[in-house]
Amino acid sequence: MGHPNIPSTRRITLTEVPSNYTFKQRLMLAIIPPLAYMVICLIGVTLRFEDICEPGTEPAYHTPPPLIYALWHRCLLACAWRFRQGKIHILISQSFDGELIARTVERLGFVAVRGSSSRDGAVGLRNLQRAYLAGNYCAVTADGPRGPSQKAKPGVTQLGQIVEASVGAIYLHPHRAWTLRSWDRFLIPKPFSRVTVGWSAPVPAERESVQAALDRAVRIAETRNPQA
């Protein structure tokens, strides 16, 4: 799971947007992803990251794929910057909101796997299975796309069971952030803040185990007292 230099932007025009979208949606798809990418870059370059791991665990930045990691939806923005250009395959719904997210994260070097842990779940699971078996990093927002917040759904555990792999858990906690009034209490790190990355040890692909691992990753990240 790497994070080298920021990729160059790719121009998106209205003609690239599927014809089933309205003109308003096409306009949003042309404007929002590059704008969101710019905001992430402007904030990201000011952030300071610190990795804290459970005993016997180390960050997976240099661990060869394939790997499966679970995370909570609310820390996606910090994740997008920290793990940019890692060629991580991330499950994103086929909704319009999902299209906005996919076009944004692809600019940061992620690979959008279309499908959902709820709607179109089987499609997303098959696509992630192919990505894992092809030797890629895979990441799933365990409580996405609509919650309830920080409650693990079965999608990531089903993937682990199918490919017979364990599941790691991470949580990124910005110590200064704006919290949105969304279902996930989405976090936008404030510029120049420190972000603690909590890593818990990989666990068997069981829903209770993944939930517990994610809860531990949250505690690791949130209880860290950042140095000045």
Image (cartoon, rainbow, N blue to C red):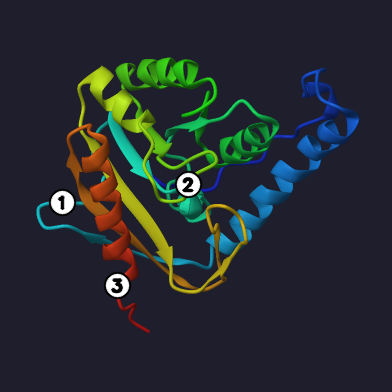
Q: Residue furthest bottom?
A: 228
* Type of amino acid under label 3: Thr
Nearer to us in this view, 218 or 14 = 218
Given the current orientation, which residue lies at the most extreme front position?
Answer: 148
User: 112 or 221, which lies in front?
Assistant: 221
Farthest residue, direction right: 23
Q: Residue at x 75, y 34 (%)?
A: 11
- At label 1, which amino acid type do we have? Thr
SS at mark 1 in the image: loop
Residue 200 in the image: state x and y as whole percent.
22, 51
- Separation (CA) of disc 1 from disc 2: 28 Å
Could you tell me which quadrant the C terminus lies in?
Answer: bottom left
**Is residue 66 shown left or right of residue 46?**
left
Which residue lies under the disc numbered 2?
148
Q: Which residue is mark 3?
A: 223
124 versus 212 height, above or below? above
For disc 3, the neighbor class at 10 Å (few under 14, some 14 to 19, many from 20) is few
Answer few, some or many: residues within 10 Å of disc 1's Cα (few below 14, many 20 plus, some between 14 and 19): few
Amino acid at circle 2: Pro
Instruction: Give coordinates of residue 192: x percent, y percent.
Output: 52, 73
Would residue 62 be seen by someone viewing this image from the given angle? no
Residue 162 location, quadrant: top left
Disc 3, SS: loop
Decide which of 195, 168 is in the foreground and name it.
168
Residue corresponding to mark 1: 57
